[in-house]
Image (cartoon, helix red, strand yellow):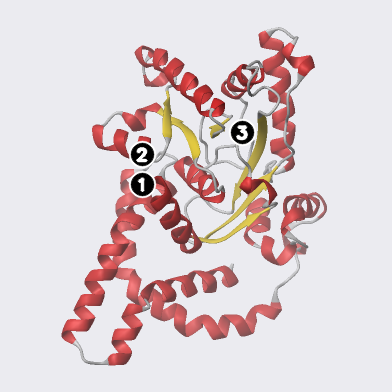
Amino acid sequence: MYSVLQFIIRVSLRIFCANITLSSKDVLQSKGPLLLACNHPNGFLDAIIIGSLFKQPVYYLARGDAFKYAFTNKLLKALKMLPIYRLSEGREYLSLNEKTFDACHQILLQGGIVLIFSEGISKHSWQLQPLKKGTARIAFKAWQEPSIGERFRILPVSINYHSFTQFGKQVIVHLGDIITKQQDLLRAQEGERTQQLNSLLATQLLKGMLVANGNTNLVQTLITKHTQLIKSPTTAVGDLQHLQANYQLTSLPKSNHLFLPKMLLLMPAIVGFVLHAAFYFPIKKLVQYVTKGSVFYDSALFAVLLMLYPIYYVMLTLLALHFTNNIALQIVVLLMPFWLWLLVRFKQLCY
């Protein structure tokens, strides 16, 4: 189930996200034992995007309250998600975290990959939140295990979004420098070594993040236009951080060369909009209502669209084939996903 869903998700993300820029592809073929330590700005979508990038299955630590219901419990576990509980979800659940950390250790012993959100909480923000103890807990136990201690690594992963609510979003994923066994930290007291590892990890995460520092508009604009501003994906965040430090919003270069591509994509984009508006906007309104006040809008919207779009596509295609003999119209409807993809490309050029 995971392999099938991973393929579907990879294809779907090419439409849901206008662009996902990856700083390096070298480690995506890596095998475990590997711990991906990531910031957490956008709910489950963070895990969906990062998990889709790696060839080997990735096990995720996800907030425990999502596992309360039988259906979602089975679905999330099929997607290799493991529950982690916070005090706010009930003191009686905290003991279950031991099972989750034991499961993570077993996955690493078997050469697996585990993804943990080191901040411990998701917040729509262009800031790094204080890191919790979970990453250090998993890491030091793995480093102390003779069979994997020398092979276990931590890979810092920084994820940046131009928006937490827009369809066709711009995303930058920065893979930091691998953190290997830290002998000096292993000899330190538990509290001290946790603090030092978190400090090292935070430094690596910040190298791959655009932090707002009071100017959210500038950061959003830099991420939005990053494909036009950067020299290469490997220097994406570094170049943008340089621009952030030295430019004002009005000083960013204009993209006049995009006029012709916009004109070429205008009509296909209109076709894509007309074919999908009646499907997309009611779902968008419903998801906005259900997820109001939470960080799950993007991930919930992606999940609902992923489940319902094939039904909408089949129904519209059958109606077109049954009620019209116009071959051109039938072909237009059959190519719906393609028009939608072009609509997202057009939207990307208009940012």
Dot 1 or dot 3: first in sequence order is 1
Question: Could you tell me how far apart the alpha carbons at marks 1 and 3 are, in whole angstroms?
Answer: 22 Å
Dot 3 or dot 2: first in sequence order is 3
Q: Position of residue 122 (x, y in %)?
A: 51, 35
Residue labelled with disc 1: 1
**Is label 3 in a helix, a strand or a loop?**
strand
Q: Residues within 10 Å of mark 2 (few under 14, many from 20)?
A: few
Q: Residue at x 64, y 57 (%)?
A: 21
Task: Give the left or right position of residue 337, taking residue 330 as reference.
Answer: right
Looking at the image, do the residues carrying marks 3 and 2 touch, with CB atoms under 8 Å apart? Answer: no
| In the image, residue 146 above or below residue 153 | above
Q: Position of residue 301 (x, y in %)?
A: 38, 52
Residue labelled with disc 3: 34
Residue type at mark 2: give it: Ala
Q: Residues within 10 Å of mark 3 (few under 14, many from 20)?
A: many
Quarter of the image for the C terminus: give it.
Answer: bottom right
Residue type at mark 3: give it: Leu
Question: Could you tell me how far apart the alpha carbons at marks 3 and 2 are, in whole angstroms?
Answer: 20 Å
Task: Give the left or right position of residue 214, taking residue 272 as reference.
Answer: right
**Is label 1 in a helix, a strand or a loop?**
loop
**Is label 2 in a helix, a strand or a loop?**
helix
